[in-house]
Image: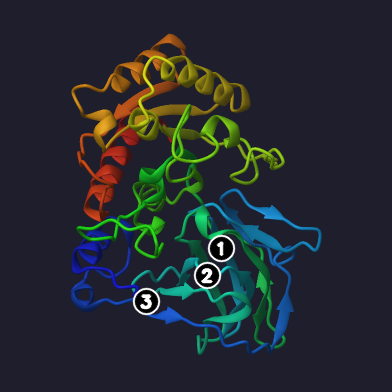
Amino acid sequence: MHRMTLLVCTLLAGPLSAQSQDWSWITTWRPATIQPEDVSRGSWFSPHVAGLFLSGRVSWNEQQKLRVIWPGTSIKGRFTGSSLAVQLEDSGRTDYQVIIDGDLKNSRILDTAPGFHVYPLARDLADGEHVFEIFRRTETFSGPTQINGFFVDQGQGFLPWNRPIGPRLDFYGDSQTVGACNECGEVEQWDDLRPHNHLLSYGALVSRMLNADSQMIAVSGIGLTLGYQPHTMAEIWNRELPDPAAPLHDKKGREPQIIFVNLGQNDWAKGVRDDFAPAYEKFLRDLRARHPGAWIVGLLGAMDVGHDARSPYPFYVSEAVRRQNDPKMLTYIFKTRTWEHPRVPDHLAMAQELVSFVREKIPL
């Protein structure tokens, strides 16, 4: 159910890891799946006091339980002892990648079950300090996950996060940024969200290549002015949840260094033409007002909005950026082209393009 192709593994080997250069394991790599065990033992820690490092737009309920809904949200932490478990509640349609001590090769997929369960994230580790990451692979359609707390060995505990983190990145986008259908093969489908793997999306790959702290504000089907969702990005971009009625997001002092905007595919598909340019300019101004010091990059591609000869969107985006007369606003149109949702090879190519562009144009 959760198989990754040999091609996926081969692509992951090069840019993503500083592990051993012996990549022979990729020919048979099939990430194992974590199932709930509902065994509660050891010392209990609330996520609010566990010293976690949170990448992504998260929220907390009144009981200080952590709620996660945006794709690419990453929960990192340090703990002592030989085992780690998490207690969470979910719809049963969400997947998370669980990475222990930075070992992507042996990472596993937490396949949630409906309701309230305990999942063993690690066991039989060597005594001492360890690092974990729980990364949301699934987009918002599966609903929120509530993380209630963690179990470690009796007498062990959590340590404050002290690992270096790279640049702070924000991504605003649609299904391309989500990574929708990237593991679907030849036929795209939307009933099962498992082949929509954000871990292997261009934004997530860029973030890993740069060791970044990222926020992914992305929903499949969304447009800036019109799309396939009941709301637009202009209505939810600064909200805590993908809902115009949700509270405004509290930045809590976090300021992105680079903001990527990859919107327009659904507006274009819905037939929006001249209305897009002024809406895009307003969105740029809103972003600048909220983040006065950030670099802002208007992206297009790799689908037809950026490459169809009939599309005026490359002009709309580049002209909107030019009209801001802002030296920290740039445009980039992906060279990678696909007439359907990008698959993993496309996402890797897009990520490599974008990393090269950032390193050339933006001081980090």
Measure the C-alpha gap from mark 1 to mark 3: 17 Å
Query: Measuring 22% from the left and 60% from the top, which residue is drawn there?
Result: 185
Closest to the observer, 150 or 310:
310
Q: Quadrant of residue 24?
A: bottom left
Which amino acid, by three-letter code, is at mark 3? Asn
Residue 60 position (above or below residue 133): above
Secondary structure of residue under mark 1: strand
Secondary structure of residue under mark 2: strand
Residue 194 position (above or below residue 152): above
First reached walking from the N terminus: tag 2 or tag 3: 3
Q: Position of residue 112 (x, y in %)?
A: 52, 74
Query: Measuring 47% from the left and 67% from the top, which residue is drawn there?
Result: 95
Q: Which residue is mark 1?
A: 76
Which amino acid, by three-letter code, is at mark 1? Lys
Q: Quadrant of residue 177?
A: top left
Measure the C-alpha gap from mark 2 to mark 1: 6 Å
Measure the C-alpha gap from mark 2 to mark 3: 12 Å
Q: Which residue is mark 2?
A: 132
Viewed as shown, does residue 141 lie left or right of 236? left
Q: Residues within 10 Å of mark 1 (few under 14, many from 20)?
A: many
Label 2 with label 1: CB-CB less than 8 Å:
yes
Which amino acid, by three-letter code, is at mark 2? Phe
Badge number at residue 106: 3
Q: Position of residue 280 (x, y in %)?
A: 46, 21
